[in-house]
Image (tube, helix red, strand yellow):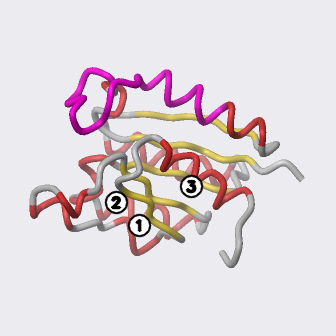
């Protein structure tokens, strides 16, 4: 059965390729979506995307994933990683296997980035692997080994 995966990205992720290329690289958000879509096709998975700079919109997307019968969520909450109990609660509420992804490694950056509220509700975290981390998360959700 084809799995449906939702890829959620938080604040400023739409600015990939522009925002701090020394940290995030030169690939754009559209490049990221194309890369994930190509991998999803290889894995015979259906993938959809949502990006917002607004916390409530991300919560709404997580809740809607429940009603849309989404099988897994890949989330890069970006700055909300370190501040949002609302995203944590939303992921807990829907019970959909979720993988937290970060392009950079927050643990190697400023101290305030070392805290992840959402991690407690996730089946895995992939950080510091660049955009490839999204593909690892996709593979984990589509072909889980022990989730």
Could you tell me how far apart the alpha carbons at marks 2 and 1 are, in whole angstroms? 5 Å
Q: Position of residue 50 (x, y in %)?
A: 50, 35
Q: Is the magenta stretch mostly helix, strand or loop?
A: helix
| The quadrant where residue 7 appears | top right
**Start and end of the magenta stretch?**
17-37
Q: Which residue is drawn at 53% across and 51% down?
A: 74
Labels 2 and 1 touching (C-beta < 8 A):
yes
Q: Which residue is drawn at 36% across and 27% down?
A: 14
Q: Is residue 141 above or below residue 22?
A: below
Task: Identify the residue under disc 2.
Answer: 86
Please tell me whether residue 27 belongs to the stretch shown in magenta: yes
Labels 2 and 3 touching (C-beta < 8 A):
no
Instruction: Tell which circle, 1 or 3, labels the residue nearer the N-terminal end.
Output: 1
Please tell me whether residue 60 belongs to the stretch shown in magenta: no
Circle 1 packing at 10 Å, graded few (<14), some (14-19), many (20+), is: some
Q: In this view, does 100 lie to the left or right of 15?
A: right
- Residue sitting nearer the eye, 11 or 134: 134
Q: Residue furthest bottom?
A: 146
Q: Where is residue 112 in the image (x, y as percent from the top left)?
A: 12, 61
Q: What element carries label 3?
A: helix
Q: Which residue is drawn at 78% across and 45% down?
A: 43
The quadrant in which the C terminus is found is bottom right
Query: Nearer the viewer's eye, disc 1 or disc 3?
Result: 3
Q: Residue at x 66, y 32 (%)?
A: 37
Q: In this view, does 84 lie to the left or right of 135?
A: left
Circle 2 packing at 10 Å, graded few (<14), some (14-19), many (20+), is: some
Image mark for residue 89? 1
Circle 3 packing at 10 Å, graded few (<14), some (14-19), many (20+), is: many
Could you tell me how far apart the alpha carbons at marks 2 and 3 are, in whole angstroms? 22 Å
Could you tell me how far apart the alpha carbons at marks 1 and 3 are, in whole angstroms? 21 Å
- Residue sitting nearer the eye, 93 or 140: 140
């Amino acid at each position: 059965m084809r799995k449906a995966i939702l890829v959620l990205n938080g604040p400023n992720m739409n600015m990939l390729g522009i925002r701090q290329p020394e940290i995030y690289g030169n690939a754009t958000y559209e490049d990221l979506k194309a890369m994930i879509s190509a991998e999803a096709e290889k894995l015979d998975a259906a993938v959809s995307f949502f990006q917002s700079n607004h916390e409530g919109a991300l919560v709404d997307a997580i809740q809607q994933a429940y009603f849309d019968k989404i099988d897994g969520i890949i989330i890069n909450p970006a700055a909300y990683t370190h501040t949002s109990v609302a995203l944590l609660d939303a992921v807990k509420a829907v019970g959909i296997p979720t993988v937290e992804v970060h392009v950079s490694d927050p643990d190697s950056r400023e101290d305030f980035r070392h805290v992840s509220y959402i991690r407690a509700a996730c089946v895995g975290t992939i950080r510091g692997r660049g955009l490839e981390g999204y593909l690892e998360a996709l593979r984990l959700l589509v072909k889980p080994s022990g989730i």
